[in-house]
Amino acid sequence: MKLRALIHASELITGAGVSQKDGRHITEEDLGAIPDGALVYSTKVVQGKTLPHKVIWTGKTSELPRRFAKIPKKNLRMKHSLIPGFVDCHTHLVFAGNRADEFAARCGGATYQQIAEKGGGILKTVRATREATEKQLEALAVERVKKSASYGVRTFEIKSGYGLDFETELKILSVIKRLKTRFPEYTFSSTFLGAHAFPPEQSREAYMREILEHMLPEVARKKLADCCDVFIDAGYYTLAEGRAILQKARALRLQTRMHADELANTESAALAAELGSLSADHLLRISDRSITKLAPSNTVAVLLPGTAFYLKAPHAPARKLIEAGACVALATDFNPGTCMCLSLPTIMTIAALYLGMSRAEILSAVTYSGAKALGLQSRKGSLEKGKDADFAVLPFSSFEEAYYRFAW
């Protein structure tokens, strides 16, 4: 086992207390911040690349044990904050096409639903994605991964959902599978979101049968997805339809997630908690009843404030969720229609300004809580001995500068 070390970090944030408290009721003391910190980690070789593997030791640089005296070290010269790598736990990163015209229309007064009724919205991206080759989709995705990683993201969740037919949904999931091979230094969680909308060429009932009897079994058989997601909302999937799809996914040993209570309150967040889903995402219209159900559960409340910002919609009630004891995560929701943003720090800025989240709550939300939303919290989300050495060296001396510097 070969070891390496990073020394003289202006601050090393381990997140140990966040992990111990399961991402709930987080305070500054839970960050485990160490001034002039050091991190010792083991390495592994994958495809000829020497990559960080496991955390071996953390502490003050002045207290580095003598047994590590001769290992290779990188001196951060008190100029860089060293933190757990960010987890972007909700993205739609694989798609083709462009919807800048719709953004302009929306800024001119058109609503998301009005645009969709005219053949725009999700279905416009579906047409472009169906027409694109796997090679074209992969090239687009590679550039997006590189950009996102430049902000400190080390773990990505990526959904399908812009195919709405068997061939294209599998094409998207196959691209995600290749990203896992192409970028061994990062972790990818793939999510089947065939239930993103309804295709124009099939009836609602026929497409439901296609998902339940054909798509889901084949996705599970080919091991193309870790999770299954459903967009339960006004104009999309009903509670009954969502329940049927997610129960089928669980029977096929896929984890479940949910787009919940974004456009209207459907009490879908309560359903996510009932089904034991990993996460309920969006929650702009979540009711107090659903907060009461969601908060004590193991289902993570994934908030996507970039989407509310982009749509000029009311933000999710972050403070209510946090104070009720929910484990709250933040993610970009990078997608072509409602949040064309790869910068997780920009999302953190919006969370600080409009969700009223503290530095400690934001750090938890983009590390441990994001990992929990993917079922990866035992390995990721904090820099503790034995966990994955997924760290990020920020170009700033303190963590909060990452979101103080808007859109850097």
Image (cartoon, rainbow, N blue to C red):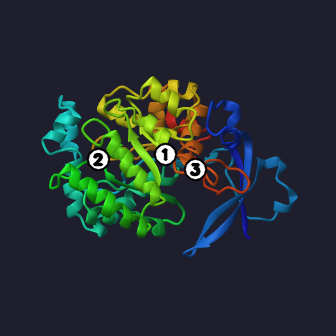
Sequence order check, earlier mark of 2 and 3: 3
- The residue sitting at 68% across, 60% down in the picture is 54
Sequence order check, earlier mark of 1 and 3: 3
Residue 296 vs residue 208, the one in the foreground: 208
On the image, the x and y values in percent for residue 94 come to: 34, 57
Q: Write down the quadrant of residue 232 in the picture.
A: top left
> Which residue type carries mark 1?
Ser
Extreme residue toward the bottom, this view = 48
Q: Which residue is mark 2?
A: 336
- The residue sitting at 17% across, 44% down in the picture is 120
> Which residue type carries mark 2?
Pro
Q: Which mark is residue 277?
A: 1
Quadrant where the C terminus sits is top left
Q: Which mark is residue 267?
A: none
What's the distance in space between the residues labelled 1 and 2, CA to CA? 26 Å
Q: In the structure shown, which secondary structural element does the residue marked by tag 1 occupy? A: loop
